Amino acid sequence: MQNNVMTKAIEQLEEMRIPYQLHEYPTVNGPVAAADVAAYLGFPAGQLVKTLVTTDHHGGYYVFCLPAAVRIDMKLAARAVGVKNLTMLAPEKFEELTGYVHGGCSPFGLKTQLPIFVEESVFGWDAIYLSGGRIGLTVEVAPQVLVDALLAHPAQFSK
């Protein structure tokens, strides 16, 4: 899958020989809404998957991948992880831990290896679209890749 664009996410996909397809979209005024990205790229919004990072405030950090069109239910997410509660990670800690900026985070190529949880609903698709490691770049992969390559845990944690 060689290409001209290289990010940490794409480096990991290449190193692990994971099949993927790269898709770019314009970002003239910064990040665009998930529905706009999906419409521009021509696929249903439910296939666009966002990557969120949370903390339990006791040294635990967790990555959640879920359809961009839905919201994370923090109580269900905490239950999936096995902790009492979770909050979203502060922006300054986010970049330090992941190596990515908000809006460009991928579960692939994370700076720090963290436990990853994937919303069960994404397994209903043959392919999903995740951040390619920067705003304006998505990678299309089979959802099972998250489990097989990243040892992600399927769980239900969206509203």
Image (spheres, rainbow, N blue to C red):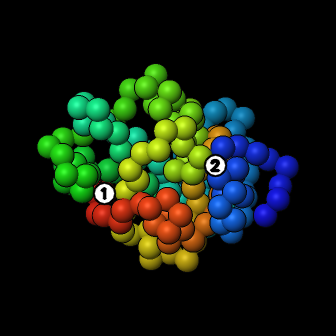
Q: Secondary structure at mark 2?
A: helix
| Residue 133 image-quadrant placement | top right
Q: Residue at x 57, y 71 (%)?
A: 142
Could you tell me residue 40's position as x and y percent? 68, 57
Whether residue 33 is visible: yes
Could you tell me residue 14's position as x and y percent? 72, 58
Farthest top residue in view? 92
Side of 2 where 77 appears, left or right: left
Q: For mark 2, does the 10 Å Cα neighbourhood hold few (<14), some (14 to 19), or many (20 or more) residues?
A: many
Q: Residue at x 30, y 38 (%)?
A: 60
Identify which amino acid the numbered label 1 is placed on. Ser
| Residue bearing the label numbered 2 | 9
Side of 9 where 1 appears, left or right: right
Side of 82 where 14 appears, left or right: right
- Against 6, is 91 above or below? above
Q: CA distance from mark 1 to mark 2?
A: 24 Å
Side of 151 where 129 appears, left or right: right
